[in-house]
Image: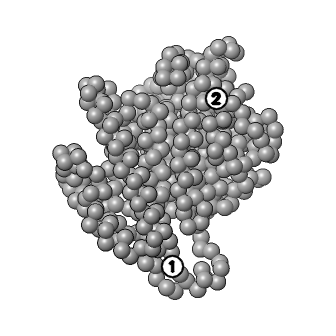
Amino acid sequence: MTNPVISRRTLLRGLGTAFALPMLEGMIPMSALAQSGKKAARINRMAFMFVPNGIHMDAWTPTTEGAFELPATLQPLKKVKDSISVLTGLTQQNAFALGDGGGDHARSAAAFLTGCHPRKTDGADIKAGISADQLAAMHIGNQTFFPSLEIGCERGGQSGNCDSGYSCAYSSNISWRGEASPVAKEIDPRLVFERLFANGNPGDTQESIARRKIYRTSILDSVLEDATRLKTRLGTHDQSKLDEYFSSVREIERRLDWAEKTNAAQKITASDRPTGVPNDFGEHIRLLGDMMVLAFQADLTRVCTFMICNDGNNRSYKEIGVPEGHHDCSHHGRNPEKQAKVQQINTFHTTQLAYILEKMQAIKEPEGTLLDNTMLVYGAGISDGDRHNHDDLPILLAGKGAGTIKSGHHTTYKNGTPMTNLFLSMLDRVGVPAEHIGDSTGRLNMLF
């Protein structure tokens, strides 16, 4: 076997910085197997994006099975249409009350990736179940610097009563390391960025951040010497790819700096929100999406969860002409005006999703694109926000799972099919030997 030009784990180092690289051709060993025309296993990632309060289903669900026309809410995804599948009929049965009364928003989030019925409590005795992302992290997390990445746009309490006697830990977390251990998410894009490229020494990292602020430099400036040496060992194509990656990182840093300067000018304090959180909600989602894409691109992790908002969230969407709260609008009572506002919010969310997926589609890898080598589930744990039902959920699967997914279709399953069957099928495709998760009954067919 001929060794690769550089190791897959090559890092560019500087003060407080361990800068990971994207997948390059020079990292692939030219073995006899590869020269014979056979292909090595492709990297495959898993991501889960959660939106709160249900969806206006009339504008979400395609009218035909198989090849389909994008309904109104999914129109922003037209550039990636061939890489998405809409799945109808999937259900989280354990998000229903099952005798526990109110609390659908808490159960919606807690059951979303676990398939387990959360214990109704607002005390310390919370109980749900291990989530699909953390099951993957336990088995494949040792292959990357971070077993998993948890991000979101809204802080979440880990105690207190947030929904009809259910702990805030339920409605603000979809990732669970164990049945009593929700995994807290990071909402500040700046902190996520620094975490991804830190060298593991907190003192060095803080000094590096302080210097960059004083001298207005990029994190790339601290690894410039290493980067220059590396480029002399790479082919023309890899040099170009590295330049594109560096440009992307610089652009993200510029936007982070802008958010911080804007917050400082408006005298927004830490009590309002972290200084790295943009005032523009769409930009907040996009920047966190950029963090997820960077982490996947540099193979820092292969597992990510992203909560757009905690379930039951009642934020206003004045920026798109909806001054009312989201949760209030979701209780529409079949009022057409309220339903139209819910659809506006849904479309705003899918517009941000489109930004993330298009960015993934533009990143070329040795085989396909980053989007081709990802499985990203997007959806809600409630179907109709007015009914608070957890069957026939609005679920979209983006990406081609390293060539294992038949994308570009609308697939209808019998209503009540456990959504956890989808997770089992996804876990198979990242090499996780799981027999069941939550209420799963088997693998999902017609898709893989």
The crowding category of the residue bearing disc 1, from other C-alpha atoms within 10 Å (few below 14, some 14 to 19, many at least 20), is some
Q: Residue at x 26, y 27 (%)?
A: 265
Residue 414: x and y, percent? 80, 41
Tell me the residue that label 1 is attached to: 29
Q: Closest to the observer: 111 or 127?
A: 111
Residue under the image location 46 percent in, 82 percent down: 3
Kind of element beneath mark 1: loop
Of tags 1 and 2, the one toward the viewer is 1
The residue under label 1 is which amino acid type? Pro
Position of residue 233 in the picture relative to residue 376 (left or right): left
Cα–Cα gap, marks 1 and 2: 47 Å
Number of marks: 2
Q: Looking at the image, is mark 1 or mark 2 earlier in the sequence?
A: 1
Image location (x, y in percent) of residue 367: 59, 66
Q: Is residue 167 visible?
A: yes
Q: What amino acid type should be assigned to the residue bearing mark 2?
A: Ile
Q: Is residue 418 above or below residue 11?
A: above
The C terminus lies in quadrant: bottom right
